[in-house]
Amino acid sequence: MGIFLKRLRAEPLVHFFVLGALLFTLHRAVIGDPRTIVVTPGLKAELGRRFEDLRGRAPSAAELDAELRQWERDEAVFREALRQGLDRDEPAIRGALVAKMRAIAAAEASGATERAPTEDELQRWLASHRALYEMPARYDFEFVAFPRTTADAGAERERFERALHDGAAPATLGRPVLGGNMSLPDMQGRVAPELVERLPSFPLGEWQRVDAQHELLLARVKRLDGGLPSLDELRPRLVADWTQAAQQEAVERVLQRSVDRYHIEERSGERP
């Protein structure tokens, strides 16, 4: 028997199986048997709370036992699905698990952004996200046209301009006063292009001459809307957007800790 044991210990195949058995025992000791489903008092209490939330009353002993048996069955089926790798083959399951991890990360990161942003942080946020808050400029403008087909169009415009300078109201001078409240893109095709080009340079409230292809114009900008509102006007939006972005950054930092535990390598011609 002693000689047999010596020969057995010398076989490489025996070494392999002994090492495997040791690793299996260590795995169970440290991690636990994945096919062992542990039922704790906390789990039973949670199942009872779920039943009560759904039915509006506490479960009887038989009902709680039925809930527990169903949970055990579902847990076993779930673990078997994971063992067979079904979670990797089904995008919907993969997405649901990723979403669950994000929810857990959000809960962990929730305390990271409880404070309000400082004035300096709001200023920097606005400077780097200006396009989110800046509105297109809108021009409240009016103009009077003098068609070039009229021989004295230039003289008519001069008389009209003098009357305005003397304090006359445009509507009392016998010519249609046109205009609108539009952004420059909205004016394209509706207003003479020469006027569209010049409007941004007009001093507010002052009548200006514009020579268009088919008509001579007198025009003014009464009010300019849009642009970037003040910090005080934007403050509620800025605080909400800054807070949301800070929360998202905190969540990504929590998730990155999980990502950092993995080694990523690329291989061609193989399924993930």
Image (tube, rainbow, N blue to C red):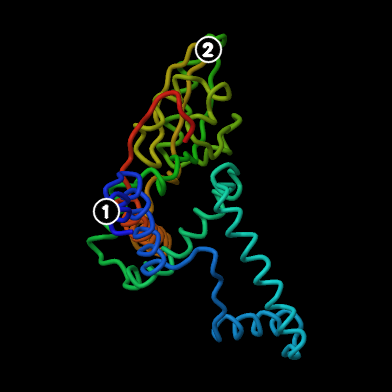
Q: Is residue 225 left or right of residue 88?
A: left
Whichever of callouts 1 and 2 sits on the residue coming sooner in the sequence is 1
Answer few, some or many: residues within 10 Å of disc 2's Cα (few below 14, many 20 plus, some between 14 and 19). Answer: few
> Where is residue 128 drawn, in percent x and y?
29, 47
Please tell me which residue is depicted at 40% across the width and 24% down the height of the picture: 268
The amino acid type of the residue labelled 2 equals His
> From the image, which quarter does the N terminus lie in?
bottom left
Please tell me which residue is depicted at 32% across the width and 69% down the height of the picture: 112
> Where is residue 47 drawn, in percent x and y?
64, 80
The Cα atoms of the two marked residues, 1 and 2, are separated by 113 Å
The residue singled out by tag 1 in the image is 6
Q: Are marks 1 and 2 in contact (CB under 8 Å)?
A: no
* Residue 3: quarter of image: bottom left
Local SS, label 1 = helix
> Where is residue 161 drawn, in percent x and y?
43, 30
Identify which residue, 205 or 114, lies in the foreground: 114
Identify which residue, 210 or 71, lies in the foreground: 71
The residue singled out by tag 2 in the image is 214
Answer few, some or many: residues within 10 Å of disc 1's Cα (few below 14, many 20 plus, some between 14 and 19). Answer: few
Please tell me which residue is depicted at 38% across the width and 69% down the height of the picture: 29
